[in-house]
Image (spheres, helix red, strand yellow):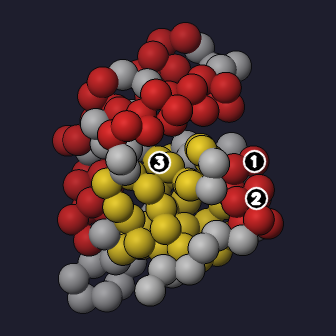
Amino acid sequence: MAAEWTSDELDGIGAAQELIIASVRRDGTLSTPRTIWVVRVGDGIYVRSVNGPTSDWYRSTRASQEGHIRAGGVDRDVTILDADQDLNDSVDAAYRSKYGHYAAQIIQAITSAEASSTTMQLVRR
């Protein structure tokens, strides 16, 4: 059964500029960690692939649905779920707000329809 994120975990991950994620392979070992952007929407933690669904890290993470993250002082095993697509506008807004100081084309890429289709929610284990 998944546990709720604590307020400190939500604040730490939400404030982190980057998150390190590794999926769990079939043999139980962790894949090569990837550094990605992360946003908090309410009490949820969300990530997506700027390169869309063909990205290797996205495909392996989505397939395993289990991983390990490090961000903002949090080091935790997670369950990785496809996010509710109804949240995409809120997730887009969170990416724009948090990373808006980057070049416009980078923000356009992370909020594109292709990237939005890869939105995943990280659930604390």
Q: Is residue 19 left or right of residue 30?
A: right
On the image, numbered disc 1 is attached to which residue? 15
Front residue of 46 and 41: 41
Q: Is residue 3 left or right of residue 119?
A: right
Residue 86 is at least partly visible in this image = yes
Q: Are marks 3 and 2 in contact (CB under 8 Å)?
A: no
Q: Residues within 10 Å of mark 2 (few under 14, many from 20)?
A: some
Front residue of 41 and 32: 41
Q: Earlier in the sequence, mark 3 or mark 2?
A: 2
Quadrant location of residue 75? bottom right
Q: Are marks 2 and 1 in contact (CB under 8 Å)?
A: yes
Can you give x and y, in whole percent of width and height, for residue 41 in the image? Answer: 60, 44
Q: Is residue 70 left or right of residue 36?
A: right
Relative to 120, residue 101 above or below: above
Query: What's the CA distance linking mark 3 and mark 1?
Result: 14 Å
On the image, numbered disc 2 is attached to which residue? 12
The residue tagged with tag 3: helix, strand or loop? strand
Which residue is painted at 23% across and 55% down in the image?
59
Residue farthest toward the top in the current orientation of the protein: 104
Q: Residues within 10 Å of mark 1 (few under 14, many from 20)?
A: some
